[in-house]
Image: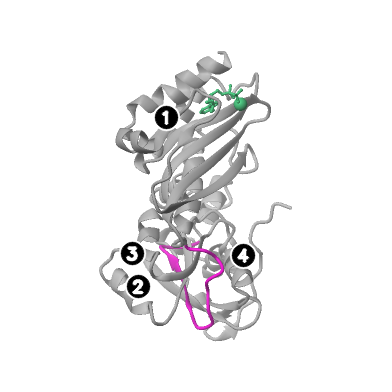
């Protein structure tokens, strides 16, 4: 199949089925097919944009299901928009496909396209362009979103005394990887839950919309809580203490039956895509209200302090972390 047919077949035509027409009509002046897309940012909003590349056998097993690869690629990018408090609008897709291989075929592309548009539909984001090349399998997605001018949740807003909070539970991404690599076996329900968490992480867009007026700083956790909270600390010129006993752990993670392992995954495993955010004591009642109303699932796991770096404590005693967050280099 030629490049143009491929684009038309798997990335342009599919989009016609989208339920996104209103959104697309309002903001996409010109989509796929010309030299550039022409996009209209809503009035009084700023463009938030982020790009990520997923390389086969580094970020996902090359023989993973194409639906799963595509969903994960788009969802993890959407998590970056959530981390800023931005609403998803558009994305571009740069695909590098092996010329001849036994796993990238038309059937593979059909699956990839199905997974991609399933996630795009769910989170109302429109594909507006891309690039298609040949080489080792890799997927680059650039997401674009809009946030009210000067209301983005940045990393540099934390103050001494702010509470450090996280959404939902941590450590599932690392546990999922252990299951997929046959280093961990749990019952079928827990294993299914973990695989879903890995391939279909939920970008915390609803939470981020609610937190925008409340959080002083925020980011999404992709490299582990300690490593990512450290980014907030560096940007804000402060330190943080994490109370290890307060880390929220899922039933699947507790079923591992090794609390220390579970906590290590929660602290330094990657791939959770939950939000880590800070909240001042004055704003805390607003967060407590959202939690009580079950509009958001969040837990206080620590505090911003003077100093540098992230320290962990268990019941007030220093807690040594055995492994650092994932590092590529
Ligand atoms: P150019 O040579 O001008 O860069 P291309 O041949 O790369 O144009 O792309 C033609 C059109 O198809 C462009 O609008 C581009 O954005 C779009 N496109 C290319 N690859 C993809 C893809 N994988 N997904 C979506 N759109 C794509
Ligand atoms: Mg091109």
Which SS class for mark 4?
A: helix
User: Decide: marks 1, 2 in contact (CB < 8 A)?
Assistant: no
- Identity of the residue drawn at 43% across and 54% down: 147
For label 2, the SS is helix
Q: Which residue is mark 4?
A: 227
278 or 118: which is nearer to us?
Answer: 278
Verify CB contact (< 8 Å) between mark 2 and mark 3: yes
Kindly state the secondary structure of the residue where label 3 is placed. loop
Can residue 203 be seen in the rendering of this structure? Answer: no
Task: Name which of mark 1 and mark 2 comes first in the sequence.
Answer: 1
Q: Are marks 4 and 2 in contact (CB under 8 Å)?
A: no
The reply to whether the C-beta atoms of the residues labelled 4 and 1 are less than 8 Å apart is no
Residue 296, numbered circle: 3
Q: CA distance from mark 2 to mark 3?
A: 8 Å
Pinpoint residue 250: horizontal percent, then vertical percent: 42, 62
Image position, residue 80 (x, y; %): 50, 52
- Label 4 Cα neighbours within 10 Å, binned few <14 / some 14-19 / many ≥20: many
The answer to whether residue 247 is seen in the rendering is yes
Q: Residue at x 52, y 84 (%)?
A: 315
Q: Main secondary structure of the magenta part?
A: loop
Q: Give the image quadrant in which the ligand numbered 2 is located.
A: top right
**Which residue does the image show at 59% across and 73% down from the upper left?**
236
In magenta, the rendered stretch is: 153-170
Say whether residue 154 is magenta: yes
Q: Classify mark 1: helix, strand or loop.
A: helix
The residue under label 1 is 114
Q: Which residue is mark 2?
A: 287
| Lower position in the chain sequence, tag 4 or tag 1 | 1
- The answer to which of marks 3 and 1 sits earlier in the sequence is 1
Decide which of tag 4 and tag 3 comes sooner along the chain: 4
């Amino acid at each position: 199949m030629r490049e143009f047919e491929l684009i038309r077949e798997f990335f342009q035509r599919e989009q016609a089925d989208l339920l996104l027409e209103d959104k697309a009509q309002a903001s996409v002046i010109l989509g796929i097919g010309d030299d550039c897309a022409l996009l209209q940012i809503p009035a009084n909003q700023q463009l938030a944009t982020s790009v990520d590349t997923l390389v086969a056998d580094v970020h996902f097993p090359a023989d993973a299901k194409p639906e799963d690869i595509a969903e994960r690629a788009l969802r993890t990018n959407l998590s970056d928009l959530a981390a800023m408090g931005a609403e998803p609008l558009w994305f571009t897709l740069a695909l590098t496909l092996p010329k001849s291989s036994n796993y990238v075929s038309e059937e593979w592309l059909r699956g990839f396209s199905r997974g991609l548009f399933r996630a795009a539909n769910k989170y109302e984001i429109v594909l507006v362009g891309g690039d298609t090349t040949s080489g080792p399998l890799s997927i680059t997605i650039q997401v674009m979103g809009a946030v009210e001018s000067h209301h983005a949740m940045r990393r540099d807003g934390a103050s001494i005394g702010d509470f450090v909070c996280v959404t939902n539970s941590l450590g599932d991404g690392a546990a999922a990887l252990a299951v997929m690599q046959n280093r961990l076996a749990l019952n079928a329900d827990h294993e299914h839950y973990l695989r879903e968490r890995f391939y279909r992480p939920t970008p915390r867009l609803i939470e981020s919309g609610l937190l925008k007026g409340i959080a002083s700083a925020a980011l999404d956790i992709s490299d582990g809580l300690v490593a990512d909270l450290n980014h907030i600390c560096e940007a804000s010129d402060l330190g943080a203490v994490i109370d290890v006993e307060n880390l929220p752990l899922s039933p699947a993670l507790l079923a591992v039956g090794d609390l220390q392992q579970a906590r290590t995954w929660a602290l330094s495993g990657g791939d959770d895509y939950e939000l880590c955010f800070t909240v001042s004591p004055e704003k805390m009642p607003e967060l407590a209200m959202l939690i009580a109303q079950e509009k958001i699932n969040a837990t206080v796991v620590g505090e911003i302090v003077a100093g540098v770096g992230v320290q962990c404590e268990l019941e007030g005693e220093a807690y040594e972390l055995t492994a650092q967050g994932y590092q590529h280099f």
